[in-house]
Image (cartoon, rainbow, N blue to C red):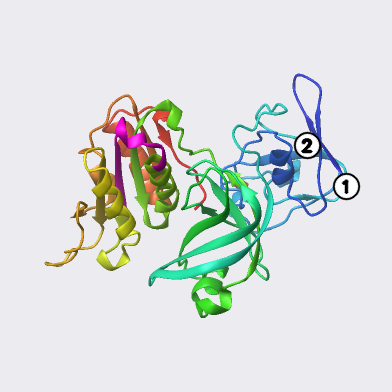
Amino acid sequence: MTITVGRKTGEPINFENNPQEKVLQSALRNQLAVPYECATGTCGSCRAKLISGELDQGWVDAPGRKALKTERGEFLMCQAVAQSDCEIRIPSSVSEGSVKGFIPDHYSGTVTQLKQLTDEVIAFSVALEETISFQAGQFMTLEFPDIVGARAYSMVNYAQQTDQLEFVVKRFEGGACSRLLFGQSLELLENQKVTLFGPLGHAVFEPDLEHDLLLLAGGSGIAGMMAMLEQADQIGYLESNSIELVFGVRSAVDIFYLSDLQRLTTKHLNNLKITIALSERMTDGELQQTTNLQVTQAFVHELISAAPTSDHTMAFIAGPPPMVDASIRELITDKGFTAEQIRYDKFA
Ligand code: FES
């Protein structure tokens, strides 16, 4: 099947769409930089309009559909699957070959190395059938058999090329994926087949820009930040730039990746500062083992004003939407950050 994107100026763009492939996936795979954020139906930013042809709308209850004018043919590209040749319109201008960085594609893999990190957090790896390259901070969508729809998870690890991807998942009450991951013994989940699409996301670490980084993470939002720290460590980025990470969790028992964070701060004492922000009250004697890390009782956004920043600092934010929103507000109003200095992907 062929999808044609009409344009206000210039010739229409045509691209091939595989059977059962989401319109967003085929557009990105064909190097068309169409708008998207979550790629899983929640944000609504992949809105497009069907001019002719037939689409299966996919997930009819997708939160991102709320603002659509469906009577005018609007649909979500990350959900819809073409049933015939289609002509569509996209609100922003698009051009061919405009996807920057690594071209997203479909991958297959097997779940391995499941590990419960806290009561609420599980880490797992996916062994891919082929290698992939991605930028630190990017994410993949994952589809598990017997679970409807895709989930978006950032890569925790970083390598220029790898066939192993590491992810971390926080329990989401009532979520089908949480029921799968938290509801049975981990041994039963090993070797689950999974299909993936990516790499996706715009909030990526670009070492060539030589920014100082302010990383603001809440809960499993730490995933992409771990990949950035790993890449920074691998390439010697911290020899000439500084990174400050604020990692928010509820209480001391909810902290994970502690030993990795300690290893990194111990290695880069001068240029890497990590603070763990506990939103609940700390008890005396807690966290004896936090060598070279600061632990404090605060919300992540409350620590922004004390962070040393400059016009050359780039802030990355990932976590629950209220934490992301509060952090953006604080960065703009208190620190005078411009929109170009703040990077985040909305896929909660
Ligand atoms: Fe499609 Fe978010 S709803 S990208």
**Residue at position x 36%, y 49% from top?**
217
Residue 277 vs 175, above or below: the answer is above
Q: Is residue 152 or residue 137 the one in the foreground?
A: 137
Residue 255 vs 72, above or below: the answer is below
Residue 341 lies, in percent from the top left, at 39, 30
- Left or right: residue 230 versus residue 200 is left
Residue hosting label 1:
84
Residue 51 lies, in percent from the top left, at 81, 37
Please, what secondary structure does the residue beneath circle 1 have? loop
- Left or right: residue 247 versus residue 228 is left
Whether 237 is among the magenta residues is yes
**Residue at position x 70%, y 34% from top?**
31
Q: Residue furthest top?
A: 9
Screen quadrant of the N terminus:
top right
Q: Can residue 102 be spotted in the picture? A: yes
Residue 277 vs 239, above or below: the answer is below
Q: Is residue 39 or residue 48 the one in the foreground?
A: 39
